[in-house]
Amino acid sequence: MDIISLIIFLAIGALVGWLAGNIVKGRGFGILGNIVVGIVGSVLGGFLFGLFGITTGGLLGSIIMATIGAVILLYLISLVKKG
């Protein structure tokens, strides 16, 4: 992975984390928090989509999949915090 790919990967992670933060809480988590939420959410989204046999194509499909995974991650975290 070259430096440009890494920068794009982190930028998409930040975008996805920011989107998920706005959907769930109404605000983001700061740049590092957004990156972490976005990356973990993309892994979770990829795993869940794979379980259901759903494939996404292109950059937009990946962003949607990662955002759904990040929203699910934030929802699960909120359940654990309440309990």
Image (cartoon, helix red, strand yellow):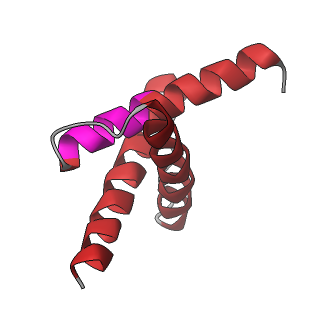
The image quadrant that residue 75 belongs to is bottom left
**Magenta segment range?**
15-23
- 61 to 78, vertically: above or below: above
Residue plotted at (41% across, 53% down)? 69
Which residue of the protein is positioned furthest toward the top in this rendering? 4
- Indicate left or right for 22 with 67 as reference: left
- Magenta stretch prevailing secondary structure: helix
* Foreground pick, 63 / 32: 32
The x and y percentages for residue 10 are 59, 29
| Residue depicted at 28% across the width and 74% down the height | 81
Residue at position x 47%, y 54% from top?
Answer: 45
Judge by depth and name the residue closer to the eye, 40 or 57.
40
Q: Is residue 19 magenta?
A: yes
Q: What percent of the width, then of the height, locates residue 58? A: 53, 26
Q: Image quadrant of residue 64?
A: top left
The percent coordinates of residue 53 (x first, y second) are: 51, 60
